[in-house]
Image: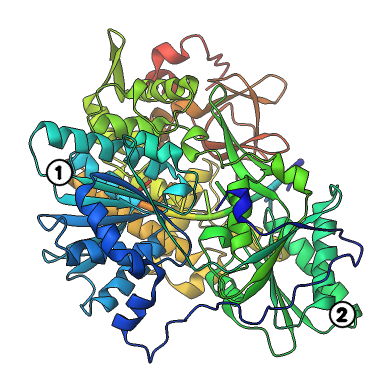
Amino acid sequence: MPNDHDHPPAKKFKPGSVFFRLDKNKPGMLLPRKGNATTPIEVQRKQLPIYQAKPQLLNQLRQLHNAILIGETGSGKTTQIPQYLYEAGIGRQGLIAITQPRRVAAISLAGRVAEEKRTQLGKLVGYTVRFEDVTSSETKLKFMTDGMLLREAIGDPLLLRYTVVVLDEAHERTVHTDVLFGVVKTAQRRRRELNKIPLKVIVMSATMDVDLFSEYFNKSPVLYLEGRQHPIQIYYTKHPQSDYLQAALVTIFQIHQEAPPSHDILVFMTGQEEIEALARTCRDIAKHVPDGPMVVIPLYASLPPAQQLRCFQPAPKGCRKVILSTNIAETSVTISGIKFVIDTGMVKAKRFNPDSGLEVLAVQRVSKAQAWQRAGRAGREESGSCYRLYTENEFDSLIPMTVPEIQRCNLASVMLQLMALGVPDVMNFDFMSKPSPEAVRSGVDHLELLGAVERKEGQVFLTTLGKKMASFPLEPRYAKTILLSPDYSCSDEILSIVSLLSVDTVLYNPPAKREEVLAARKKFSSSEGDHITLLNIYRAFKKVGGNKEWCRENFVNSRNMGLVKDVQAQLRDICLKLNMKLGSCGTETGNVRRCIAHGMFVNAAELQPDGSYLALDTHQPVSIHPSSVLFQGKPAYVVFNELLHTSRCYMRDLCLVDADWLLEAAPEYFGRKLHPSKS
DNA sequence: GAGCACTGC
């Protein structure tokens, strides 16, 4: 798609003027033949664009060890390729894995393919995602998250159960997909060397920019599939916009004025606050213009599920539907009936600084690929339009592709996984897009501090502790803390705390009910810090048996609490497999804090004489986040869960610790860093 | 005295 000449000629418009006119739907335009209940599945399958190419495709895929498959949206590649392979008897000696970046996609695709094969889900066709394994000994087509295949690879680096691995949505370049690229490439080579059954690797992507893929997989051929995307008219602004929110507002109401009310609008923005503010403004204005009623629907991930579902409901007749969304609507949520996309050209994304170890969330410009992805959301059922709130020149200056996540994240976890996979030289792992040497070194240094790796003669080795750490689906420091917990007889407590920390917050903070929230939370508040406070909440939650009413009264997110229980059960299982002795310290929460201090000493901060705090590893100034229960106090030493860089550098989720505990945990590391005036 | 794009094991 990103080949610019493939796109319709651009038009220019200027928010604030009535410069543009909307294209009327051209008669005779090819519309998709929609699948419906009366069309038999066999017929539906044959109507997919990919069906025409089936013989040539199979001919190619039979011969090739590697193939890159480019398929536009709606080509049917994800549901059909696995079936074609199976029906043609390719890879029958083992399983065909199809990986997806997201759980919902893996689950729903498996359901669809099982339906097409007229079998019960979990028999011939199944799926595996975290907490859910719907497969059996009969399963041949296995849909799974990429993270799940990566976990399996730790136990079986050659992926010997599989004869074909299909890496779908490869253009998204998640960390897991990027690591898998290297894992499958290595497995392929090793299996050849060891005379095992060969492994076929099919990389599927939606973008045409595949030189990198092809080059990486031994110059493998690229196969193109036509899709069913409808034409999209692209509009740019005449002049750069200094205020993209204002430009979005004007554009929304221009469309509202000119287009039939049944044409829905999707606006891409950067975050919750911005979306809620614009939603209010739109509702206000809509009341005072003569162009008919408007429903404005905010859409972002932290919205409760029931409110997220609102974006799928059609607006009442004669009423315009406007969805204001983060990039959740770029990939994760697909809304039908969108006729207009408004693209602010901005996105909030994470950046990582290996020197400070800081991840920063910042508003930045989208990439060209992202801009096309956004535009594509307007052409799913019929032709549509995309209004870019930037000039064509500005578009030309965007970076072509989004920087892969592996180049903007903390690599400690990735390095630990690679070593657990038996990669001999992790510092020089064959990444498709190499992270900077500084980032790699910083990741390995972090593991060395935790005692997960050792350096000998310039090489890095996994320690016994490191091997155990890798068996947990957790950040290394969490895994380490769990492994330390039997020494402090507080495994029950640590398992709960780590589970609480590894899901999105279990605390629900509606701004309108601030006083009520504070009052409700006071009951659980502990002067020992946020970890113990969370533990108190969890204990109370368990005591009432996960009662939903209790959750509502206490401003606790019951969905996330449920997740905490799942995570805890999974972690407990892993502990038992490692023959750990689990126990509880009861009310002796001092043990819990000692254990946390020992496991998370890298994230320690010290009170300075002037009342400020310094992080002990980087010596940068940090502050206690106002959401912490320790915000009012001035503890001499704390360990924190994460640093959040916003208006200042804030420590979030703090635990009160003694200087002695930190010294015990890492005598050499802290030898010259601590200045214990009191402990 | 603040405020969190999005996934995933």
Question: What residue did someone put label 2 on?
Answer: A287
Q: Is residue A130 left or right of residue A673?
A: left
Q: Nearer the viewer, mark 2 or mark 1?
A: 1
- Quick one: label 2 or label 1, which is nearer the N terminus? 1
- Residue nearest the observer in this picture, A494 or A163: A163
* Image quadrant where residue A117 sits: bottom left
Indicate the position of residue A355 as horizontal and vertical percent values. 55, 21
Question: What residue did someone put label 1 on?
Answer: A198
Q: Callout 1: few (<14), some (14-19), or many (20+) C-alpha neighbours within 10 Å?
A: many
The structure's colour scheme is: rainbow
- Residue nearest the observer in this picture, A650 or A150: A150
Q: Is residue A489 left or right of residue A386?
A: left
Indicate the position of residue A667 as horizontal and vertical percent values. 40, 14
Q: Chain of mark 1?
A: A
| Total numbered labels | 2
- Residue nearest the observer in this picture, A629 or A77: A77
